[in-house]
Image: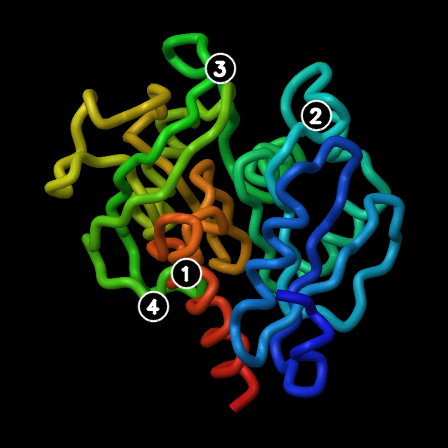
Amino acid sequence: MAASSQTSVETVRFGVVVFPGSNCDADSYDMVNTFPGAGARYLWHKDTVIEDVDCVFLPGGFSYGDYLRCGAIARFSPIMAAVRDFAAAGGLVIGICNGFQILLEAGLLPGAMHQNEGLKFICKLVSLRVENAGTPFTSAYEKHQVVKIPVAHHEGNYFIDDEGMAALEANGQILFRYCDDDGEVTAAANPNGSLGSIAGICNAEGNVFGMMPHPERVSDAIVGGTDGRAFFQSIIDSVLEGRE
């Protein structure tokens, strides 16, 4: 899965940000390079400029040891100013797990994270229902499709005030919800207590997205599943369509 094998045909470029404490960066980098025509390169947390990438990827892990709150220190990394500029210019930005927490702390997505309802770290496969299939992050899925994607977090209990929740609903910003295997959104199927069983949201402009589950961990059959693959295919398709 080495990037060099695809360099000559690479057309869609992901920049994977590496913070001190990131531990899903290599997985994300390798996974992107399994897609024909796509490639990834690392972006260091001290970088101040983002160039020659189509999508910025904030991966999972424990940035800066998760001191204070998850993502609370990473939001001050030098690269985050460049991420804000990239997003403001319409660039695609994704945050997975700790990356989602960083986007919340940085104000690039609305809401906040609490500790899981059970106050325990959760690591298991969960079912998600696709709520909006008309975005750059979900277009390769069908609306209300049920997918299996793993979670691995201690602070994944998403919260937002009533006004914010109403805006998310009205604008179609809720892209994934936790559900049971039949697609029913129930309290029992919600692994962390997230308000509205929210697993993933985008910003009002539709170009910044965060989710707690890890699609990069189920994007190759060799590791036990491919339900996350359509997430990255959606991004690749969106970039290519934007060039037409």
The x, y position of residue 207, in whole percent, is 53, 59
Q: Point out the frontmost of discs 1 and 3.
A: 1
Crowdedness near tag 4: few (<14), some (14–19) or many (≥20) residues, C-alpha within 10 Å: many
* Residue 159 drawn at (x, y percent): 43, 24
Q: Is there CB contact under 8 Å for labels 3 and 2? A: no
Of callouts 3 and 2, which one flags the residue occurring earlier in the amino acid sequence?
2
What amino acid does circle 2 point to?
Ala
Q: Which residue is mark 3?
A: 115
What residue does disc 2 label?
A: 72
Q: Would you say 139 lies left or right of 26 here?
A: left
- Identify residue type, mark 4: Ala
Residue displayed at 28% across by 42% down: 128
Identify the element where label 1 is drawn: helix
The x, y position of residue 79, in whole percent, is 81, 48
Name which residue lies at 65% across and 64% down.
14
N-term-proximal mark, 3 vs 4? 3
Answer with left or right where residue 102 lies relative to residue 83. Answer: left
Residue 159 shows up from this direction: no
Is the residue marked by circle 3 packed among few (<14), some (14-19), or many (20+) residues within 10 Å? some
Question: Alpha-carbon distance for marks 1 and 4?
Answer: 9 Å
Which of pointers 4 and 2 indicates the residue nearer the eye?
4
* CB under 8 Å between discs 3 and 4: no
Label 4 or label 2, whichever comes before in sequence order: 2
Closer to the camera, 7 or 135?
Answer: 7
- Tell me the kind of residue under disc 3: Gln
Q: Is residue 213 visible?
A: yes
> Disc number at residue 229?
1
